Amino acid sequence: MESALTWQWVLVLGSSIALFFLAPWSRKVSDFFKATSETVKAPNTFLLTSSLVISWIFAKSITNAANLGYSYGMVGGVAYAGYYLSFVVAGIVLYQLRVKGGFTSIHHFLGDRYGKGAIAIFSLLIAFRLFNEVWSNTMVIGSYFGEPGSQPYYLSILVFTALTLAYVLKGGLRSSLLTDLIQMVVFGLLLVVILGWLLPRTPGGLATYTASGQWSMSGGIALLWVALPQSLSYPFHDPVMTDRAFITDP
């Protein structure tokens, strides 16, 4: 157990420090918020998509999906995946806002249609949403290093938060997009390796996992019915998703 924790610390510290040095400096406001540079006017679609996907699935989402899959089998995983309808909903709505409305952000749309009061209220909601996102994800990180309330738990949260904040302040969105791409590549490779090792050693192979769980309300379907309607509004409270929709040409 101690050796595993040691390797976790090595991984967190080593990867975070490496990402800090790899992250580019943003010397202009447009570099920091729009991920532009002297040679790149706007990030490409693949880079933005990789960043969006990895930002959504890492930490809390992976833990939630794993816990639901463990408790409810395939049904739990499918139920949690219902939240990913948010990608489709946000894509359709934000595309219409940009192409037909000519808006440059959700705040632009709200200010034009409903005034400054709507912008203020929406900004407060976003601030609350981001605060919730930060502490919930750091709690997941802390749970890998110690029991809630323990010294290793809080220490890992502080270290992880400080290192992440450092490379974000260094390069803003440029740093985030680059490091997200690196994490996406690593995630893809590890996924292939893990599945390649796990599936051949599982009796029944992939069918064992797809047949697990019970398709009933108590078996996980209830969560699916919760996730689907939430996906109609959830993405618009997530600036990680919405901000990236206004960076490149539609």
Image (tube, grey):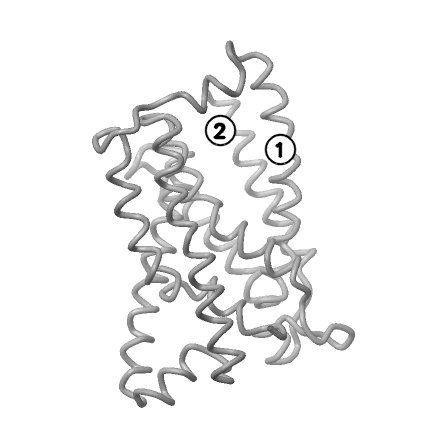
Tell me the residue at 58%/67% (across/down). Answer: 173
Residue 215: x and y in percent read: 30, 28
Residue located beneath label 2 in the image = 5
Residue 26 relative to residue 208: left or right: right
Q: Nearer the viewer, residue 185 or 217?
A: 217
- Res. 143 mark: none
Helix or strand or loop: what does disc 2 sit on?
helix
Residue drawn at x 31%, y 89% is: 116
Relative to residue 106, is residue 16 depicted above or below?
above
| 35 or 3: nearer the viewer | 35
User: Seen from this angle, which residue lies furthest top?
Assistant: 203
Residue 190 point in image, percent of width and height: 62, 33
Q: Residues within 10 Å of mark 2 (few under 14, many from 20)?
A: some
Q: Nearer the viewer, residue 15 or 55?
A: 55
Q: Residue at x 51, y 12 (%)?
A: 204
Q: Residue furthest left?
A: 218
Residue 119 sits in quarter: bottom left
Instruction: From the top left corner, tell me how far across and down residue 72 is, in percent.
Output: 32, 27
The residue that disc 1 covers is 190
Q: Amino acid at mark 2?
A: Leu
Give the mark, 1 or 2, whose residue is nearer the N terminus. Answer: 2
Residue type for callout 1:
Leu
